[in-house]
Amino acid sequence: MKKLSLLLIVAGLVLLGVGGYQWFHTAQAQKNSLAEAQAMLDEGAKESDETASEQPAETTESFSPEMGNTAGILHIPRLDAELPIVEGTDEDELEKGVGHYRGTAYPGQNDQIVLSGHRDTVFRSMGELELGDHLTVKVPYGNFTYEIVDTKIVDADDRTVISPTAPEEVLTLTTCYPFSFVGSAPDRYIITALPVEGEK
């Protein structure tokens, strides 16, 4: 009996250690991505100031980051959050921050923009957002603000939430649901936001 108890204690400590390491590793990766994103935005703003009368280095049409590269920052005022946006939604990208779904648009490109994140890391407080809340996507060529107009829960296998919306621009945020579910969640929580006129 004592051996079994000792074994369970050791197993618990190992699991805690592994979980702690993974949490630290993910937090560090997100911190690094956020620093990269901020440096990129600062450089973009500097170049825009220096070439105000010329064509900027990054434009709405030309912006297309490589897979795994930092693309910008998602600012969520209600949560006082600044989250790095990384191109791609594979596990490697989502470990670094909010993933931009490859093949969807970026701000100003007049189509659907899809951003995904883990419910237990970058999007852990997503359920606190309400209709009317603002989300700002910061990219090298400007800041674009969107207002939340809808939320819904869909099946994890429902791909209809990712669909072209041109010429209307729509920002879609997705994460696993329920938020407190242990293991592979059966559903997805979807937030839909539309551009706020006059705010870029």
Image (cartoon, rainbow, N blue to C red):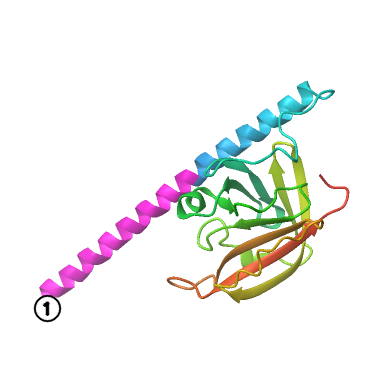
Q: Is residue 1 left or right of residue 89?
A: left
Q: Residue at x 62, y 36 (%)?
A: 38
* Image-based side of 193 in relation to 91, left or right: right
- Residue type, mark 1 in image: Met
Position above or below: 167 against 35: below
Query: Hey, which residue is sitting farthest right in the picture?
Result: 198
The residue indicated by pointer 1 is: 1
Q: Considering depth in this image, is 133 or 184 the residue closer to the camera?
A: 184
Displayed quadrant of residue 17: bottom left
- Is 54 a magenta residue? no
Residue 2 part of the magenta segment: yes
Q: State the image coordinates of residue 10 (x, y, percent, origin top left).
A: 21, 64
Q: Quadrant of the C terminus?
A: top right
**Left or right: where does residue 105 sit relative to residue 197?**
left
Residue located 79% across and 27% down the image: 55
In the rendered view, does 198 fall on the left or right side of 140?
Answer: right
- Residue at (17, 69) in percent of width and height: 7
User: Looking at the image, is 190 positioned above or below residue 134?
Assistant: below
Q: Quick check: 177 above or below 137? A: below
Query: In the image, which residues are magenta?
Result: 1-29
Callout 1 secondary element: loop
Picture quadrant where residue 127 is located: bottom right
Q: Position of residue 3 (x, y in %)?
A: 11, 72
